[in-house]
Image (tube, grey):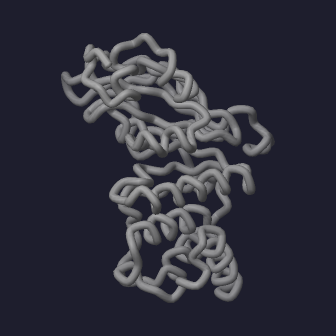
Amino acid sequence: MTDARAAPDVITVTGLSRSFGQRVLFRDVSFVVHRGEILVILGGSGCGKSTMLRMLMGLLAPSEGRIAVLGGDMAQADVALRRKVGVMFQMGALFGSMTLLQNVMLPLEMHTDLPEMARESVARTKLGLVGLGDAAGLMPAEISGGMAKRAAIARALALDPPLLFLDEPSAGLDPITSAGLDRLILDLKRDLGISFVVVTHELASIMAIADRCIMLDKAAQGMIAEGDPRVLAESSTHPTVRAFFRRETAGEKP
């Protein structure tokens, strides 16, 4: 059996389309996510970023096309495959009645046979990785938004997945806290070799963390750009791509 961490691509998307009734959100989208890279999905409101992420996570079936994640078909993903993927939802989605430690221990309780002391040790290690080693006993209501995002990442790391999905990690954060979260993502990539798929519209974060990006567009009903965001920002001739990176109205002259 091939080791998922040794595979050159952790995600392969081929001919992906998604419709809701007669409304086509996007069609014939294909791209890959390489092992150990951070791929950012970006685009304007209503282009299908969140829908694409849910499809990659196996929460929503494609209308057409195929998604292979870590060598498995996400449309038929079993528990073993889903355990190899960590998810941080947009607002953290921490359980308010549990401490941060208990939140991070939860995946270990659900998916492993580790004794309680071992589960607690692993959870404390993950909280330490995200800079929350001293906050294990706090409740979600007692922490800041930035700490909640970090705790959610710690929980996503609980089962040592080689792939993490992050939904708007910087949403609602001030610039300094957002920059700290960007550094954390880069550190996890460097130190643990984790691959990331990130949905965000924050330009500063995109430029700070993305190895590559794909850009979806509502009007085009599909993908209009792929590549290094710094290169796209500098040299793309597509009016929508230029407008996004330059924060202009499409067609506006600088």
**Residue 113 visible in the snapshot:** no
Residue occupying image coordinates x 56% and y 22%: 231
Residue occupying image coordinates x 58% and y 45%: 196
- The location of residue 70, given as percent across then percent down, is 65, 41
Q: Looking at this view, name the residue that lies furthest to the top.
A: 237
Residue 227 higher or lower than 85, as above or below: above
**Residue 153 visible in the snapshot:** yes
Residue occupying image coordinates x 57% and y 76%: 132
- The location of residue 157, given as percent across then percent down, is 61, 63
Q: Identify the image quadrant of residue 16.
A: top left
Residue 194 higher or lower than 181, as above or below: above
Q: Nearer the viewer, residue 145 or 140?
A: 145
Q: Looking at this view, name the residue that lies furthest to the front.
A: 254
Q: Identify the image quadrant of residue 42.
A: top left
Quadrant of image for the N terminus: top right
Q: Nearer the viewer, residue 108 or 237?
A: 237
Residue 187 higher or lower than 22, as above or below: below
Quadrant of image for the C terminus: top left
- The location of residue 187, given as percent across then percent down, is 67, 56
Q: Does residue 191 appear left or right of residue 232 in this picture?
A: right
Q: Looking at this view, name the residue that lies furthest to the left.
A: 22
- The location of residue 112, given as percent across then percent down, is 65, 71
Q: How many marks?
A: 0
Q: Nearer the viewer, residue 188 or 12?
A: 188
Residue occupying image coordinates x 40% and y 50%: 168
